[in-house]
Image (cartoon, rainbow, N blue to C red):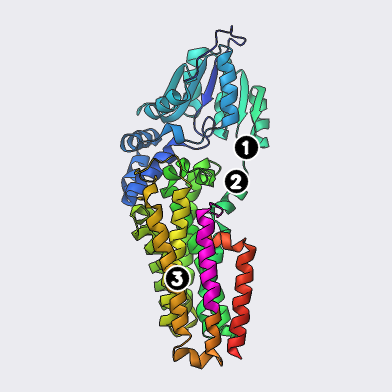
């Protein structure tokens, strides 16, 4: 906890600081709601009832049923540094919020700068005019400076001496300057639209290209109807995947904030409001299912299964050792099934078997990299939000490399099967793909061991020149096998 300096106060006016969106780049009420819904989505029904009784009652009920880690909340660091300067100068700092007072006290205790905390107590909601009345009664008209971030704070600035604007746009800055003497301005550290696009994770959409594989393997991608249906299936899965990523980020909020890299994600960092995710996530999922039903009911069923499995993974399975990677591998395989269903391409047992082994290997690479990167976790202690420990690295490596080599074995057996005779004039030449695949799998695991890989092997492969060379050589072999 910071120790105040004995430097005489240079400004006798107290500085009153808003909490939600100002001191922290998030909102405690939405933080509590997300945690409650993560525990049980059906809490939405009592939440609506509590909201009908007023926001104060809602905040109180949410605070009673959830726990927040004040240390991991996304603070506005430049503004906190400014508050530290003011505190060192001997100035009185007051934290004011419409959130529950108990939650605000926990935040104030962590920051260690505030002399007093004013918050909602279940009866009084300190927002807008009510907050201004409390501050005016306590410090007098124009007897305090106020730091805020939203149009709701204009009510308070009209009674303040100086307006300090934090994490807001130029328009609000100008309006605040007309209400009180303009003070310091702390500009937003991110762009909302860019952050929203980032939370969709468009770089992950490349995984949905797997949908085209069944048509490619069956040599039917050149058919216009097949290409059109596979393209629509790709778009639908992109919508569904983005919706799932948003829901997953909300469900994994606490674990992400403790992760060295994932703490920079839009919701974990506070760059994007949680309420945006609570709206956008379900909308994307609903849109994806609606479009899937227009393509075919068979494909819609596969898409629904994909969403059910990904939702299960986000809410619980990701915390279960081994079952999590089998789910991840299954989600890749379901994309293959979706490709078959969308274009009505005959199922290939060889392709499905190959996918199970290769995708299990990649899922284990992903888990290995994530586990190996979490150095603060002691030996024997579980990774936050997961069930693995650092002692599991050797087992994960063994399982992952074995799965990858089994995929190469399935490919070798396929090259000697009766089915391959129909599609290729020289099927034996397909065996040349096996050493390429074995080299690629071995290299991926070697780079993971050396900590030279992105936490997602698919994303890494897209930026890896050697992967492109191997893919090009494999295409040459396929062309030679075709005749």
Badge 1: residue crowd in 10 Å (few <14, some 14–19, many ≥20): some
Q: Are marks 2 and 1 in contact (CB under 8 Å)?
A: yes
Residue in front for this viewpoint, 246 or 97:
246
Q: Report which residue position mark 1 lands on.
A: 188
Answer with mark 3 or mark 1, whichever residue precedes in sequence: 1
Instruction: Give the left or right position of residue 296, taking residue 182 as reference.
Output: left
Q: CA distance from mark 2 to mark 1?
A: 9 Å
Residue beneath label 3, please?
405
Describe residue 374's horizontal placement relative to residue 41 as left or right: right
Which residue position is annotated with label 2? Answer: 192
Mark 3 vs mark 1, CA separation in Å? 49 Å
- From which residue to which does the magenta span run? 433-456
Residue drawn at (40%, 34%) of the image = 69
Can residue 24 be seen by looking at this rendering?
yes
- Residue at x 39%, y 42% (from the top left corner): 33
Q: Secondary structure at mark 1?
A: loop
The image shows residue 275 at horizontal and vertical percentages of 48, 46
> Along the line of sight, which residue is nearer the eye, 323 or 406?
406
Q: Nearer the viewer, mark 3 or mark 2?
A: 3
Q: Secondary structure of the magenta portion, mostly?
A: helix
Question: Looking at the image, is 116 positioned above or below residue 376?
Answer: above
């Amino acid at each position: 906890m910071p120790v105040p300096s004995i430097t005489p106060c240079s400004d006798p006016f107290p500085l009153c600081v808003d909490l939600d969106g100002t001191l922290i780049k998030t909102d405690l009420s939405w933080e509590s709601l997300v945690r409650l819904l993560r525990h049980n989505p059906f809490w939405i029904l009592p939440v609506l009832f509590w909201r009908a009784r007023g926001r104060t009652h809602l905040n109180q009920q949410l605070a009673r049923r959830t726990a927040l880690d004040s240390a991991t909340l996304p603070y506005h660091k430049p503004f906190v540094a400014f508050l530290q300067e003011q505190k060192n100068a001997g100035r009185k700092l007051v934290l004011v919020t419409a959130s529950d007072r108990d939650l605000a006290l926990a935040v104030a205790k962590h920051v260690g700068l505030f002399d007093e905390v004013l918050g909602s107590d279940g009866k009084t909601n300190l927002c807008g005019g009510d907050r201004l009345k409390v501050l005016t009664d306590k410090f007098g008209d124009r007897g305090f400076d106020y730091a805020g971030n939203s149009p709701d704070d204009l009510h308070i600035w009209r009674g303040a001496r100086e307006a300090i604007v934090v994490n807001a746009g130029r328009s609000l800055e100008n309006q605040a300057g007309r209400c009180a003497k303009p003070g310091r301005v702390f500009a937003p550290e991110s762009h909302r639209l860019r952050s929203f696009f980032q939370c969709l994770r468009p770089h992950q959409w490349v995984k949905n290209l797997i949908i085209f594989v069944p048509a490619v393997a069956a040599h039917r991608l050149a058919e216009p109807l097949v290409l059109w249906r596979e393209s629509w299936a790709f778009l639908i899965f992109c919508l569904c995947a983005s919706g799932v990523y948003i829901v997953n980020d909300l469900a994994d909020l606490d674990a992400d904030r403790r992760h060295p890299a994932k703490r920079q994600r839009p919701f974990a960092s506070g760059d994007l409001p949680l309420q945006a995710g609570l709206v956008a996530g379900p909308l994307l999922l609903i849109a994806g299912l609606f479009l899937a039903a227009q393509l075919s009911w068979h494909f819609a069923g596969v898409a629904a299964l994909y969403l059910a499995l990904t939702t299960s993974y986000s809410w619980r399975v990701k915390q279960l050792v081994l079952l999590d990677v089998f789910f991840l591998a299954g989600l890749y395989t379901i994309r293959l099934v979706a490709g078959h269903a969308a274009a009505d391409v005959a199922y290939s047992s060889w392709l499905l078997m190959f996918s199970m082994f290769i995708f299990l290997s990649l899922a284990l690479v992903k888990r290995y990299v994530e586990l190996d990167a979490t150095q603060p976790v002691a030996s024997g202690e579980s990774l936050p939000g997961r069930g693995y420990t650092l002692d599991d690295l050797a087992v994960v490596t063994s399982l992952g490399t074995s799965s990858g080599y089994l995929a190469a074995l399935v490919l070798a057996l396929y090259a000697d099967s009766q089915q391959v005779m129909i599609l290729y004039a020289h099927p034996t030449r397909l065996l040349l793909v096996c050493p390429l695949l074995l080299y690629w799998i071995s290299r991926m695991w070697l780079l993971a061991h050396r900590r030279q890989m992105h936490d997602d092997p698919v994303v890494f492969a897209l930026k890896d020149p050697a992967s492109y060379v191997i893919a090009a050589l494999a295409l040459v072999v396929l062309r030679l096998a075709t005749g």
